[in-house]
Image: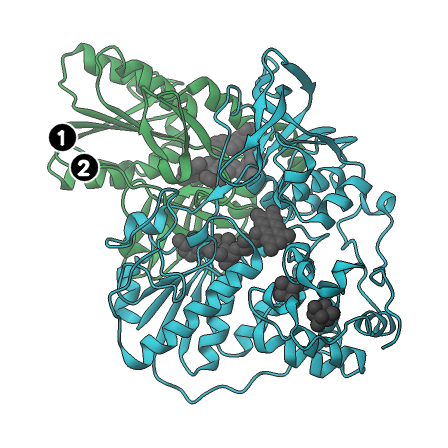
Amino acid sequence: MNKIAARDMVVPNIHLLTVEAPDMPGKLRAGHFIMVKADEFGERIPLTVADWDEQSGTVTCALMQAGRSTRKLAEMNAGDCVSTFVGPLGKPLQIEKFGTVVCAGGCYGIGSIYPVARAMKAAGNRVITLIEARGRYLVYWEDKLRETSDVLMVSTSDGSTPFRGRNSDRLRVLIEDGEEIHRVIAMGCTFMMADISETTRPAEIPTRVSLNTVMVDGTGMCGACRVEVDGNTRFACVDGPDFDGHAVNWDLLRIRRRAYYHQETISEER
Amino acid sequence: MAKVSPKKTPMREQDPQVRIDNFEEVPFGYSEEEAMIEAARCLQCKKPLCMQGCPVEIDIPGFIMHIAEGRFQEAVVTLKKKNVLPAVCGRVCPQEEQCEKLCVLGKKFEPVAIGRLERFSADWEASRGEAPLPRKKKSTGKRVAVVGSGPAGITVAGDLIQRGHRVTMFEALHEAGGVLVYGIPEFRLPKKIVAREVNHVVRMGVKLVMDRVIGTIETVDELLEQYDAVFLGTGAGLPWFLNIPGENLNHIYSANEYLTRANLMKAYLFPEYDTPIFRGKRVATIGGGNVAMDSARTALRLGAAQSIIIYRRSRQEMPARLEEIHHAEQEGVDFRLLTNPVAFHGDETGFVKEVECLRMELGEPDASGRRRPVPVEGSNFRITVDSVVISIGNSPNPLIPNTTPGLETGKWGNIQIEETTGKTSKKGVFAGGDVATGAATVISAMGAGRRAARAMHEYLVTGRWEPQETS
Ligand SMILES: Cc1cc2nc3c(=O)[nH]c(=O)nc-3n(C[C@H](O)[C@H](O)[C@H](O)COP(=O)(O)OP(=O)(O)OC[C@H]3O[C@@H](n4cnc5c(N)ncnc54)[C@H](O)[C@@H]3O)c2cc1C
Ligand SMILES: Cc1cc2nc3c(=O)[nH]c(=O)nc-3n(C[C@H](O)[C@H](O)[C@H](O)COP(=O)(O)OP(=O)(O)OC[C@H]3O[C@@H](n4cnc5c(N)ncnc54)[C@H](O)[C@@H]3O)c2cc1C
Ligand code: SF4
Ligand code: SF4
Ligand code: FES
């Protein structure tokens, strides 16, 4: 049982969920995730950590409402308890001084890229943060991200910001403009991560992606999270979720994420 | 001596046609009369061979005599001296390989139904309300961390709390019991029985901390700063796959995933519970152990019209308990023996639709003494399925070894221990159960826990940690 310290909808469909977990913050690193189960009937679902505070002993995740489990959490409030909040899980990202690092985030990844940008900045990198959304009204944490980035670039597909397009379009412009990029990290929806990986492939820029497969336990016990990387089967929860974007079999990942499509519809219609 | 009935007193059970539509327990257990009749079959041997077959050396004639005399409470007391989980072992021990295998009656007749009598005693006690707590020794002030709440961990926790140590048990999942809660299905081991046994050690004073993955939130070295000794009973939870083409198609599960969704997450009650499971109509389970039987029988209960077991050896080599194989047959599980999968084929959207197999023949015995299956060249054929459960084994999770310097592991990542004490290569750290042996049995995990608890007590009291040969 962990108490929810705050739950706010920052932009339509995305909630910041802050949970009391006193001894977790000291152990968290950029790229870690937690598994949360809302109540007795709940599913265990993974969420990437977006921020944490040792003083108050809280952990914050950016939650995007997708189906039943995320909705359940989105409907909970400060003072309510989630029945399970376990972590840190997964391997943290490799943080060191690479030179220029591009951090790309979209949807919930705008939140979860924040600790990455922060850690990369602290390690002495020049940090270029790219975030994308359908429109400006869906962009959050701009101020926080600006603080931890040398450059913050917001792209929207409706043109409500100066740059119209996606993170990958913005990244392509950067590469074409001759920006020397030493590493790219992408977090958010699968489409965006795959897209970013394709963008950096020709120039062979090392690209890390944080895969969001279906998971059950999150500790390496079930194999629901299998992905194919470099032709080998890996478990996203313990071997990742951070992987080389150029080695991931994206087609398989898309297929596997549809495994419960039918049941999810039943669950949602309830 | 009265004439001994040649057969075990039968145990009433749910009709196969009824039970494949529910998740309730299959056998009903003995009544007091039936138990007394069965107990009277025991010859009360002076040198009871049965005891040699029990890994925890239960005083088998002793507890059976109490039952025969109708002194059920005393039967329980006798059992619990050696076995903290009689309700579990009575149900899931492979008795035909252990205690009952050696029972002298078995030479001419059916052996005494030791497992059923053990189960009866434990259930009898449960029906009287909460079990009385054993007396605890004076506090030693020593602190012990037990990692993992499966049978090995529960045994260590129960033994050490009785000896006066302060025990904290950590569990990664949201429920305690290990495989007993996430793997073995409700129809074979009701979860309320596991909960009762876990609750028993908690009532004895064990502090249980759930949702805590040791190795990430806290390393073993960090535990050693706060505890005088650590026991690792983290099991063998990492599922193996076949490494054949098509294995990552949708609706191909590991048995761990399939059973965890069904049991721990209660997907059989979906959508009341949120976790989904695919209710296949034609389900193939690959493997021949208890886990495979559990998966194939779960598939039936989730509505499969056809539940197939694909096993590469023959019936004789199947490692599952006899009772489980019988139950599976009665329920209509279709056994395809001497058959080995070589590939999975899917439809254009990535869902499995066929298993490609090879026929096998039995060759010479291999290292395990079982005859080695050899493929028949060119015998490829396909079985139509809509889901597959892979149940070919598990090895220990590498999380703790990877984060614990100085902890030696073997070829399959199993933690190396000294057999008789559970001592690992790291001072103050003990281990036992599936994490050391690889996937085995409930009772062997408990036996390992018992031995480790004895050695841990000794270490806690004397502080001595002689250099040991690791096995
Ligand atoms: C390591 C990891 C980290 C994650 N971090 C976050 C995070 O920080 N914030 C966040 O909001 N979500 C995150 N996710 C995704 C999140 O776990 C899923 O959105 C959630 O499990 C969906 O549950 P649901 O019942 O609400 O939706 P479902 O009913 O399960 O699904 C609803 C819709 O979402 C799609 N979907 C299913 N699984 C996923 C998935 N894994 N990711 C995205 N869409 C999915 C389905 O195809 C379906 O169309 C992460 C996933 C992983 C594996
Ligand atoms: C489906 C199935 C059916 C079976 N049927 C039978 C049967 O009929 N008869 C029989 O005798 N045996 C059976 N077995 C085998 C038996 O269940 C196991 O041998 C036994 O449970 C092993 O006990 P254990 O305590 O070593 O480990 P487990 O029961 O595996 O428990 C280990 C526990 O440790 C936890 N853990 C792991 N890593 C960590 C960590 N880093 N931090 C905290 N906690 C952690 C796990 O979550 C788990 O709860 C079956 C097994 C399965 C899977
Ligand atoms: S614990 Fe298992 S082996 Fe021992 S007597 Fe009971 S059923 Fe037999
Ligand atoms: S060997 Fe059989 S008959 Fe003899 S004591 Fe044991 S259970 Fe009874
Ligand atoms: S979620 Fe179960 S192994 Fe990764």
Chain bearing mark 1? A
Which chain has been coloured cyan in this picture? B
SS at circle 1: loop
A51 vs A193: above or below: below
* Residue B311 image position (x, y, % from top left): 64, 31
Quadrant in the picture for the N terminus of chain B: bottom right
SS at circle 2: helix
* Residue A99 image position (x, y, % from top left): 11, 28
Which chain has been coloured green in this picture? A
**Looking at the picture, which amino acid does disc 1 mark?**
Phe
Nearest the eye: B412 or A104: B412
> Which residue in the structure is indicated by mark 1?
A98
> Which residue in the structure is indicated by mark 2?
A120
Label 2 near ligand 1 (CB < 8 Å): no
Q: Residue drawn at (19%, 38%), measured in percent from left and top?
A: A95
A168 vs A4: above or below: above
Q: Earlier in the sequence, mark 1 or mark 2?
A: 1
* Residue B233 image position (x, y, % from top left): 44, 59
> Would residue A77 be found to the left or right of residue A249 on screen?
right
The quarter of the rendering in which ligand 4 is drawn is bottom right
Q: Does any portion of residue B363 appear in the rendered image?
A: yes
Q: Quadrant of residue B20?
A: top right
Label 1–label 2 contact, CB within 8 A: yes
**Looking at the picture, which amino acid does disc 2 mark?**
Met
